[in-house]
Image (tube, rainbow, N blue to C red):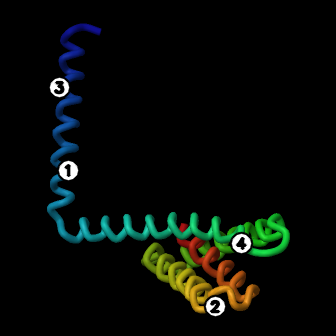
Amino acid sequence: MSSLERGEQYKNEIEIQRSLNYGVREFFKERDRTINLAINMMLWFLTVFSYQVNDYYDYYFPGDQFEALITLSTVELIAYVVADFVYERFSSTPNKKLFYFAYTIAITGALTIIINDKRVLWLDMIGEFITKFGIACAF
């Protein structure tokens, strides 16, 4: 590679870096995009956090852990199929409707767990399955 070619390549790299910096600044100047980014980051954090909390909560169920894991995996697989159906069904604004659908289900399951407070164990397990279903749809 000649020095002229290296100089041209270096010039192109500098232009790309400048355009990227300019693009990020322009991105954050628009208030709507910044708010959407913050909301999406919060939703992603909530999804991942809920997913991890549900995985740790599974160990407190009595009985065979493998049966509980198989049941939760089945619930998760069904949730992925339902999420795909909801995504395809509402093609005009699929992400928004899917998130509303998934988080409504997840909040219902979480409230069931919170209100029950381990008084009725099977209701606690159903609440956990519902929460897992909603979070898997959002994931």
Mark 2 nearby-residue class (10 Å; few <14, some 14–19, many ≥20):
some
Q: What element carries label 4?
A: helix
Q: Is mark 2 on a helix, strand or loop?
A: helix
- Hey, which residue is sitting farthest top in the picture? 2
- The structure residue drawn at horizontal position 65% and vertical position 71%, both measured from the top left corner, is 57
Q: In this view, does 40 lie to the left or right of 117?
A: left
Mark 4 nearby-residue class (10 Å; few <14, some 14–19, many ≥20):
few
- Please tell me whether residue 29 is drawn above or below residue 2 in the rendered image: below
Q: Is mark 3 on a helix, strand or loop?
A: helix
Q: Residue 116 carries which label?
A: 2
Q: Quadrant of residue 83?
A: bottom right
Q: Tag 3 or tag 2, which sits nearer the N-term? A: 3
Check disc 3 and report the residue beneath it: 11
Mark 1 nearby-residue class (10 Å; few <14, some 14–19, many ≥20):
few
Q: Tag 1 or tag 2, which sits nearer the N-term? A: 1
Check disc 4 and report the residue beneath it: 60
Check disc 1 and report the residue beneath it: 23
- Please tell me whether residue 80 is drawn above or below residue 26 in the rendered image: below
- Give the Cα separation between the discs numbered 1 and 4: 49 Å
Residue 92 pos. (x, y %): 44, 78
- Disc 1 marks a residue whose amino acid type is Gly
Q: How many labels does the image show?
A: 4
- The structure residue drawn at horizontal position 76% and vertical position 66%, both measured from the top left corner, is 69
- Disc 3 marks a residue whose amino acid type is Lys
Q: Nearer the viewer, residue 122 or 102?
A: 122
Q: Check if mark 2's residue and mark 4's residue have beta carbons within 8 Å.
A: no
- Disc 2 marks a residue whose amino acid type is Asn
Q: Tag 1 or tag 3, which sits nearer the N-term? A: 3
Q: Check if mark 4's residue and mark 3's residue have beta carbons within 8 Å.
A: no
